Amino acid sequence: MAHERLRGGGSIGAELGEQGSTIVRAGGAIFVAGQSATGAGLSRGADGAAAQADAALRNLKVILEDAGASLDDICKLTVYIDDRAHRIPVYRTLGRHLRGVHPVSTGLIVRGFERPEILFALDVAVVSQRGGRHRRLRKYHSDATRYGNEWQPLDCEFCMAVIAGRHVFLRGQTGQTLEDRLLVRGNPYAQAVQAMQNVKTLLGEAGSSIAEVGKVVLYVTDRAFLAPAQAAVLEGLEGTPCAMSEIIVKGLASTELLMEVDVFAMRP
């Protein structure tokens, strides 16, 4: 069956620009262009970042409806922010729109976007629930979660793993344990070892395993951290060949976190 290639409509589409409303529907999976606000008149600072996140989520809702889906079908968020100071207002906006959904999430601080006025962008992984409701494991509220030594009042509802049919999506894993303890500071290799231990545990709980991993994305906050973190990730993969990307970012949820790994797997 050929993929359906759609464009979202509605009044918000014009606000965010044509690129922001491209959708490809391939069976139960729905691929959506990254959402960000574009155009003249965008304000700066924390309020501007929150307003851009609000516009992006409103647009996302419209274009998912055009594809026969909804915000409830979202499995994973990848959140890109230009400044750590914008993290709390952006996430509070996301939390308001996604109340009760409990996606998994990866949050990245990046150096910039295609246009200088853009402060925020969002990628989502979406799988239709027509074949059965997604299972969301280890649900939690972000305000009860520690990021390094920080408590951040993000007011979001997330989970650690989403099972969507045969697809398994994990929260981005860092050097923190699944109980939110950062045992090792300043050592990217040790943090990556802990992250992969978390991955193995979560995949097991989701009915999958390291042998079922198809794609890995490794993020580090300094080029010097790439080689040791990569070595630990490859050890954690236990010889499983998979697609892998490595990206250097400006920052993660906490300045104490040196690496994060996204893992996408299937259930046998």
Image (spheres, rainbow, N blue to C red):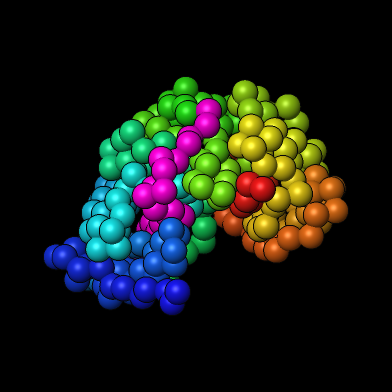
Q: Is residue 255 left or right of residue 243?
A: left
Of residue 148 and residue 195, the one placed in the foreground of this image is 195
Callout count: 0
- Residue 238 rendering spot, x and y as whole percentages: 84, 48
Give the magenta-colored segment's residue range: 116-138
Q: Is residue 29 visible?
A: yes
Who's the residue at 28% across and 38% down the image?
A: 96
The N terminus - image quarter: bottom left
Residue 39 in the image: state x and y as whole percent. Answer: 25, 71
Does residue 196 sit above or below 5 in this rendering? above
Tell whether position 131 is magenta.
yes
Q: Which quarter of the figure has residue 246?
A: bottom right
Residue at 53 percent of width and 28 percent of height: 138
Camera sees residue 202: no
Q: Which of 5 and 93 is in front in this view?
A: 5
Front residue of 128/238: it is: 128
Q: Judge whether residue 101 is colored magenta.
A: no
Residue drawn at x 41%, y 43% as measured from the top left: 132
x and y, in percent, of residue 88 in the image: 39, 39
Q: In which quarter of the image is residue 185?
A: top right
Image vertical order of residue 70 relative to residue 1, above or below: above
